Image (tube, rainbow, N blue to C red):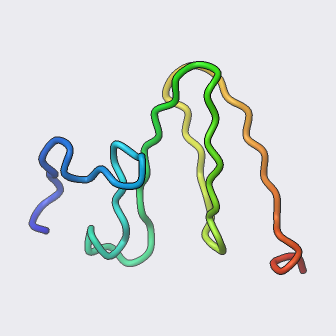
Amino acid sequence: MTGWHRAAGSAADDGYPIAISPESAGWGFSGLRILDLAPGRSRRIDIGEDELVVLLFTGACTVEARTSPATRR
């Protein structure tokens, strides 16, 4: 990748209109996934050991966080 620009639709993956991994962006650690949900719809996201930030652009949402028994300390 050169620069910060991505052609429209070129960064879509796995149901996300934009999904950029650290590897595809050439960054050290963080990635970016944008999710566009219709009212009343939901999405389950398994983040593994990663940290997650939820940034709501419009509307309202409920976020539930659960840990699996294997990751509890």
At a point 43% along the width and 44% down the height, the residue shown is: 34
Relative placement, left or right, of 42 versus 38 is: right
Q: Give whichever of 7, 39 is nearer the camera.
A: 39
Disc count in the image?
0
Relative placement, left or right, of 11 versus 30 is: left
Relative placement, left or right, of 46 versus 8 is: right
Task: Using the rendered view, name the quadrant where residue 68 is placed.
Answer: bottom right
Q: Give whichever of 40, 4 is nearer the camera.
A: 40
Residue 39's place in the image compared with 10, above or below, is above
Quarter holding the N terminus is bottom left
Residue 17's place in the image compared with 69, above or below, is above
Relative placement, left or right, of 34 versus 70 is: left
Residue 72 coordinates in the image, percent (x, y): 88, 76
Task: Using the rendered view, name the quadrant where residue 64 is placed.
Answer: top right
Residue 14 coordinates in the image, percent (x, y): 41, 54
At a point 59% along the width and 51% down the height, the residue shown is: 53
Quarter holding the C terminus is bottom right
Residue 2 coordinates in the image, percent (x, y): 9, 66
At a point 16% along the width and 41% down the height, the residue shown is: 8
Task: Using the rendered view, name the quadrant where residue 20 is placed.
Answer: bottom left
Residue 40 coordinates in the image, percent (x, y): 64, 21
Residue 73's place in the image compared with 12, above or below, is below
